[in-house]
Image (cartoon, rainbow, N blue to C red):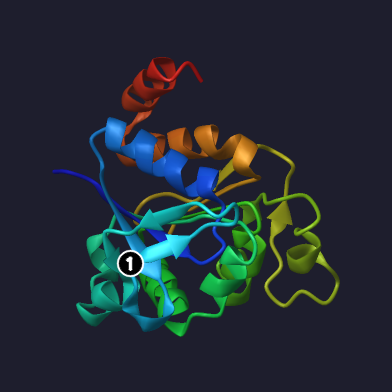
Amino acid sequence: MIKKAVVLLAEGFEEVEAVTPVDYLRRAGIEVTTAAVSVGNALAVKGARGIIINADTTLEELSGRKESAFWDAVIIPGGMPGAVNIASSKEACAFIAETAAAGKWVCAICASPAIVLAPLGLLAGRKFTCYPGFEEKVCGDDAANGGKWTDESVVVDGNAGSGGIITSRSAGTAGVFAIAVIRQLLGEAEADKIAKAVML
């Protein structure tokens, strides 16, 4: 059975953190769909460095079909204001929460673990990582949804079927982040094969 993942793209997303997982997962044979989180149902989304990507579909279209449980993983790039724009989208937050509730993988990198996942309560009591400094939003004394921060490049907490979370630190860790997603979806052998192919 082919595994399926959706990558959410909002204005100001970090391009490397979006394109690298799309590329590596597709190399592994995972069906990846990019979904624009945008105003006006536009497919073209501009990244933080001004690179425009034409998404495969819009989140509005996916949400309208109530397909969150259809995906094996949802991937949330970081970047500013991309992470904030996803966190500000009711549709995106509902989609992510529903995906987690269905026991699927929720994967976030850079600022997104703290900006997107923590307010949804998805990091509460979980081990995670994020862009340096953003952990204070999750682990501070006043954080309502506190998690257990670590400075590892990639952190996997949980497993498929129980709402597993994969987090990573930044554009520089996008490759190992993508390999970690492949490992959870397809196993060690396929993850090692792709890592070797890209010389990671």
Q: Is residue 194 visible?
A: yes
Q: Position of residue 117 (x, y in %)?
A: 57, 67
| Frontmost residue, 188 versus 71 | 71
| Res 115 → quadrant | bottom right
| Res 75 → quadrant | bottom left
Q: Residue at x 67, y 73 (%)?
A: 145
Toward the right, the furthest residue is 141
Toward the left, the furthest residue is 1
Residue 95's place in the image compared with 193, above or below, is: below
Determine which residue is flagged by label 1.
43
| Frontmost residue, 16 versus 105 | 16
| Frontmost residue, 68 versus 103 | 68
Residue 95's place in the image compared with 123, above or below, is: below
| Res 174 → quadrant | top right
Q: Is residue 105 visible?
A: no
Residue 162's place in the image compared with 169, above or below, is: below
Left or right, 193 with respect to 136, comes to left
